[in-house]
Amino acid sequence: MKFCSECAAPVTLKIPADDTRERFVCVACGTIHYQNPKMVVGTVPVWDIDGDLKILLCKRAIEPRLGFWTLPAGFMENNETSSQAAQRETIEEAGANIELHELFSILNVPHVHQVHLFYRATLLDTDFAAGTESLDVRLFSEHEIPWDDIAFPTITSTLRFFFADHKARQQGRGFQLHAHDFIKSEHVPS
Amino acid sequence: MKFCSECAAPVTLKIPADDTRERFVCVACGTIHYQNPKMVVGTVPVWDIDGDLKILLCKRAIEPRLGFWTLPAGFMENNETSSQAAQRETIEEAGANIELHELFSILNVPHVHQVHLFYRATLLDTDFAAGTESLDVRLFSEHEIPWDDIAFPTITSTLRFFFADHKARQQGRGFQLHAHDFIKSEHVPS
Ligand SMILES: [Zn+2]
Ligand SMILES: [Zn+2]
């Protein structure tokens, strides 16, 4: 940020009165331009044939991580709820018809100023198709997941949490919310 | 937003190529200025004397809703996690020493472009004190909560969810995550 979006004067980095952090402040009109984390919201779309689970993944057609596999997800927009965002991204990236379930993971990625949320979802049919931001969309059972070619650590974690909960569920426990923070030096949590 | 924060040229509202929504786009350098929801993060700080629960509320010293009561909460900052934000806001607004627990509520307020998150927390002592954004900080048992003077519907909901779960807990159920969306015409959910 170099200029004030309200009056076009230059901005300077300083700590405003009654604040403790540096902000971009306009030298002319005094507007403080706050910058806050963004939410990335998506789904874990499950196709379940008699307990034989498959997960829908999208191969990214855009940077970053072009060509790597991801769960359908994207930036939450103004004027929508987090579950609307999850459903919208699943349609846009994978053309998938889903029933949305509970929030399943909340993952902080503070060094990129992001919080990722994933909802569990049931695929209603297999009429999915790659959207403009996907090169391919495919169903994977657990042993078929391309673990070495997953786009982001939050996706790897969410998939691992999902399969672990699915196994625990066969022993009577339900799915639960998983929270995890990705601190900078950490790439893939075990 | 009237001017580009990168080059100071005017911006115009239009739908960029490969997009479906109007964005502020710079007429000179072409930068697309995305605007996304912000996260407001806080705690439900609990002081528990032999099962006699009291909740810490702050009386707002700032607009909006100056003079109304709220749970300690505020905008999440870049470079912090959601639980760090919850802890920081509880210290800044209420000077309270807490132990943070699980995420307890996620509340969408799409018409103001916000998502509110509240974590359960245990007060470690009663050495709390109003911060610069609070006029007063006080402990309230359930029947003392000033329900007519609560600052925001997300606070009312979170408090009601909390006391309902606390009662259910005495019957053997645990605390659970509560998700609720506040659609514009709705003020206080029952
Ligand atoms: Zn200005
Ligand atoms: Zn520009």
Image (cartoon, coloured by chain):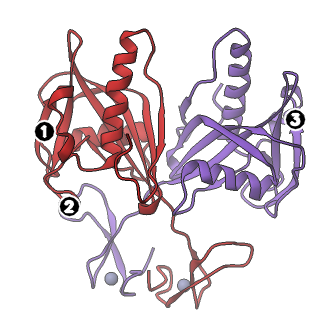
Chain colours: A red, B purple
Q: Is mark 2 within 8 Å of ligand 2?
A: no
Say which of A171 and B137 sits in front: A171
Q: Position of residue A36 (x, y in %)?
A: 51, 62
**Quarter of the image where ligand 1 sits:** bottom right
Are discs 1 and 2 less than 8 Å apart at CB? no
N-terminal label among 1 and 2: 2
Q: Residues within 10 Å of mark 2 (few under 14, many from 20)?
A: few
Report which quarter residue A49 is drawn in. Answer: top left
The answer to whether residue A2 shows anywhere in this view is yes
* Residue at disc 3, secondary structure: strand
**Residue B58's disc number:** none
Q: Are marks 1 and 2 on the same chain?
A: yes
Mark 1 belongs to chain: A
The residue where tag 3 is placed is B140
Report the quarter where the N terminus of chain B lies.
Answer: bottom left
The residue where tag 2 is placed is A63
**A190 over B132 or under it: above or below:** above
**B65 over B190 or under it: above or below:** below
Q: Amino acid at mark 2?
A: Glu
* Residue at disc 2, secondary structure: loop
Mark 2 belongs to chain: A
On screen, residue B101 versus residue B112, left or right, reads right
Q: Are marks 2 and 3 on the same chain?
A: no
Are discs 1 and 3 less than 8 Å apart at CB? no
Say which of B180 and A108 sits in front: A108
Q: Position of residue B136 (x, y in %)?
A: 89, 52
The answer to whether residue B153 shows anywhere in this view is no
Q: Amino acid at mark 1?
A: Val
The residue where tag 1 is placed is A137
Q: Position of residue A148 (x, y in %)?
A: 19, 45
* Residue at disc 1, secondary structure: strand
